[in-house]
Image (tube, helix red, strand yellow):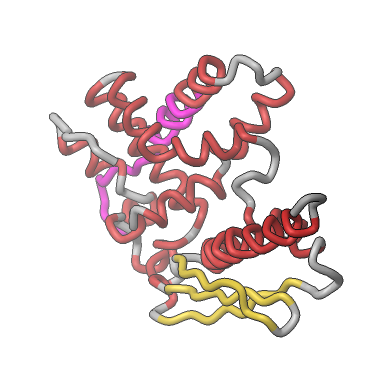
Amino acid sequence: MAHSFADPALLALALVHRSWCAEHLGARSNERLEFLGDAVLGVVVTDHLFNAYPDLEEGELAPTRAAVVSAVALSEVALEIDLGEAMLLGKGEEIQGGRTKPSILADALEAIIGAVYLDGGIEAARSVVMGLLAERLAAAAAGPGRYDFKTRLQELAARRGPSSVRYEVSDVGPDHAKTFTARMFIGDDEFGEGVGRTKKAAEQAAARMAFEALNTVVEELIDSDSPGA
C-alpha cells in the first residue's frame, strides 16, 4: 500500500479502534472513516470490474465484487500487510486477540481507504485499492472459485482416485500474533505446505502449492494417454 499522507493525522485516526477510545477520554475512533472507506472501496471495485470486464453480466459482476470486498477477504489482506500490529486497541480487546479479528481488521482497512480518499482524492484511493486487491479481483473475475485453491484442489484430487484430501495445521506464537503452518495430504502422501497469519490462509497456501504440483502431474498423465503420445 503506497500513499504518502499530506495529513498523517488521518492515517493515525484510521488505526484507532473504539475499544481504545473507551479507555482514553476524548479519543476518536476510526468508525466514520470506515463508513466512508466502505463506500469508496465499493465505487473503485465496481468501476474497475465494469470497465475491465465488459463481458461479465450483472449476475456475475455482483458476486465477483462481493468476493473481493467481503469482511473475510479484506481481513485476509489486512493480515498480509500486518495492519493489526499498527492498531490502537483497548487492553481488553488486545487480550482477546483483537489484532487478528477479521471484523476489526476489515473495518480498519476500509478506514484507511477512507483516509486516503480524504487525503489524496479518488485517484489516490484507486491506486491503493488496486495495489491491495488487483490479484484478488483478477482471480475472482476469472470465475467462481478461481482463488479458492482448496476447492480446485479437491476437484483435481478426485481425478486421481478416491483418496481424501486432508490438512494438518500447527501454530506458533502468542494468541494475538500466531503464525500457522499447514501441510496438505492426499491419503498418506504430502503434496504441499503453506504458512499464513490465519489457519485458512495457511491451508490456502498449502493447497495452492499442491494444486500446482498435482495439476502438472495430471496434465502429464493426460498427455501420455493421448493418441499419438
Where on the picture, by quarter, is residue 10?
top left
Q: Main secondary structure of the magenta part?
A: helix
User: Which region of the structure is painted magenta?
Assistant: 22-42
Tell me, yes or no, whether the highlighted magenta stretch contains residue 16. no
Residue situated in front as seen by the camera: 72 or 135: 135
Q: Residue furthest front?
A: 228
Tell me, yes or no, whether the highlighted magenta stretch contains residue 33. yes
Which corner quadrant holds the N terminus?
Answer: top left
Q: Residue furthest bottom?
A: 188
Across and down, in percent, residue 35 comes to: 45, 31
Residue at the location (22% across, 35% down)? 3
Residue at the location (58% across, 77% down)? 183
Which corner quadrant holds the C terminus?
Answer: bottom right
Across and down, in percent, residue 127 comes to: 32, 28
Please tell me whether residue 48 is drawn above or below residue 12 in the rendered image: above
Residue situated in front as seen by the camera: 188 or 73: 188
